[in-house]
Structure formats: structure tokens, C-alpha cells
Amino acid sequence: MHLEITDLNRIFVGKRGSVVALKNINMHIETGEFVCAVGASGSGKSTLLRLIAGLDTPTSGTINVDGQKVTGPGADRGMVFQHYSLFPWMTVQENVEFGLKLQGCSQKERFDTASYYLDVVGLVNFAQAYPRELSGGMKQRVAIARSLACHPKVLLMDEPFGALDIQTKERMHEYLIDIWQRLQCSILMITHDVEEAVFLAQRVYVLSSRPGTIQRELTINLPGDEETPKNRTYKIKREPEFFKYSDEISSLLRGSHTEEAEAIAQ
Ligand SMILES: Nc1ncnc2c1ncn2[C@@H]1O[C@H](COP(=O)(O)OP(=O)(O)OP(=O)(O)O)[C@@H](O)[C@H]1O
């Protein structure tokens, strides 16, 4: 899998003028990579993900997945949103089977695939539960299973843990690292949480605000990363390298805020 974004611009034109949400975005994601795009509010993160998902159209520039131009939504890109997007009237099993049903898979194939991914996210025992019976973290694990069940080439995650409390969020990070290692899937996650990006990603794109541009691309190398399988647990947060990356990204974000504030003041 090779996702390539070239000279991407998105300008929103409204009654009160135009907003340059994204300007000259160039980025790529390779097979099995875990990449985060981190940026402050208004840096165009959601716009970027919606464009990759094919839910919006660029003003200029291109997005290609394995050389195919993105022109709309497709099963090759799975989405997980911040707000739980499960169907409340369906059981967990039915929710995970939903995309497979749309793809025309047989009942047995749907059942087997959904059961496999529910096992991956540790929710086999909740297959017959309804979303209302689950905690926020469990709902997001179902949403991840539902996306993965359709075998996307890349999983796109829009602040998926933004609504969770800190302890649940940390547990979800470890779950996600585990899923990513086991399935060797490609993930692009957007977030405003610097520590989340450093903990999860192999590479981080730092976005500036208004207009959203790529300020910096960092490769994250934390102790233990050279081993296989990668071994990121919460202990890594105590390492000086973790502080160094978090500090560098936070400084970049603060800088972009200052410029934004100055631009507003002028
Ligand atoms: N449909 C739209 N029409 C007009 N302007 C829009 C539209 N969508 C986004 N924008 C503007 O584009 C900019 C980027 O918005 P976007 O939601 O992508 O940022 P974000 O980084 O995801 O922010 P947040 O973290 O607050 O969700 C903002 O200035 C926003 O007001």
C-alpha cells in the first residue's frame, strides 16, 4: 500500500470570504506504517482526513492509493470517527458484519470475519450486546473491528479517543499498538494530542494552523523500537527521548499558534 498526497489544497469559499484550510500538503504512508498528523484546532486535520476518505474534494492536488486517484469513498480506506458511529439497533456482531454485508459476503464469511476481528479487539464475549451496553472505549473497539473487517488498505482515524477519559485512552493506545503489530495494518491517525502522536506513531506530521500546512515531519525512534515486535508500553513515556519529541512538537504547535494570533491581530 502506498498512499501519496501531492500538492493538496482545500479552500472553503463562503459568504464571509474564503478559508484556506489546507495549503500545499505533501505526505505519504507506506504499508504497515503508523503515521499521525498532529495539529491544533483549525489546522485542517479533519478536512485532510475527509479528503483522503473521499468525503470531500480537493481544490487542487491529488490523493492516490496504490496509484489510483481518490475520487470518492472506497472500501480500500476504513474510517473510525471520534463520535461513536455504531448503529444502536444492531448488536455488536451485526455492527461489525455491516460493511461485509454491503460487500455481498456470505453469511458464514461475515460471521467468521466479524468473530475474528471481535477477538482481535477483545470483545468476543460482547458479540450479542447492543452499543448502549458498552463503555466508550468498548464502542471504539467495535468501530475499529468494523473498519478492519472490510480489510481496508489503510485505516483512517479521526481523533478516535478524543472523547475518552485519560485512563481509557491509555488502555486504548496499548490495544491499538497491539492490533497494529499483530495485523501489520497501515494507519493514519489525526489528533491534537501530542503525547498520543509520539506514543503511537512511527512518523508524525506536524500541521500549522490557518492555513494548515506541514510544518515538520518527524520520524519517531523510541527505545525498543528496533526490536521486533515493537514494544511500546506506557513505560516509554518516562524515557528522555519521549520528552524530547513531545517537547519539540509542542514548541512547533505553540509557534504556529503565535503566528496565528499575530495574523489575527494585524
Ligand atoms: N465546510 C466548511 N466550510 C467552511 N469552512 C470550513 C469547512 N470545514 C472546515 N472549515 C474551516 O477549515 C479550517 C480547518 O477546519 P478543520 O475542521 O479541518 O480543522 P481541525 O484541525 O480538524 O480542527 P478541530 O481540531 O477543531 O476539529 C477551519 O478554519 C474551519 O473553520
Image (cartoon, grey):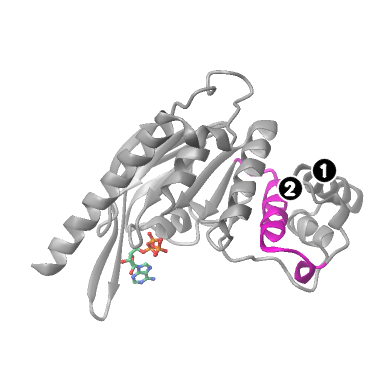
Looking at this rendering, what residue extends furthest in the front direction? 238
Lower position in the chain sequence, tag 1 or tag 2: 1
Q: Which quadrant is the N terminus positioned in?
A: top right
Main structural element of the magenta stretch: helix, strand or loop?
helix
Residue type, mark 1 in image: Tyr
Left or right, residue 178 beside residue 73: right
Looking at this rendering, what residue extends furthest in the left direction? 266
Q: Is residue 140 magenta?
A: yes
Residue under the image location 41 percent in, 39 percent down: 204
Q: Is residue 265 magenta?
A: no
Which image quadrant shows ligand 1?
bottom left
Left or right, residue 186 beside residue 214: right
Q: At which x and y percent is residue 114?
A: 81, 50
Q: Secondary structure at mark 2?
A: helix
Residue type, mark 2 in image: Ala
Tell me if residue 101 can be seen: no
Residue situated in front as seen by the camera: 106 or 206: 206
Q: At which x and y percent is residue 194?
A: 41, 47
Q: Which quadrant is the C terminus positioned in?
A: bottom left
Q: Quadrant of residue 215?
A: top left
Q: At which x and y percent is residue 60?
A: 31, 53
Q: Which residue is mark 2?
A: 149
Residue 240's disc number? none
Residue situated in front as seen by the camera: 49 or 122: 122
Residue 160, compared with residue 197, is above or below; it is below
Looking at this rendering, what residue extends furthest in the top direction? 227
Residue under the image location 37 percent in, 57 percent down: 58
Q: Which residue is mark 1?
A: 116
Q: At which x and y percent is residue 202?
A: 48, 32
Residue under the image location 65 percent in, 66 percent down: 85
Q: Range of the magenta residues?
A: 130-153
Within 10 Å of disc 1 (Cα), the crowding (few <14, some 14-19, many 20+) is some
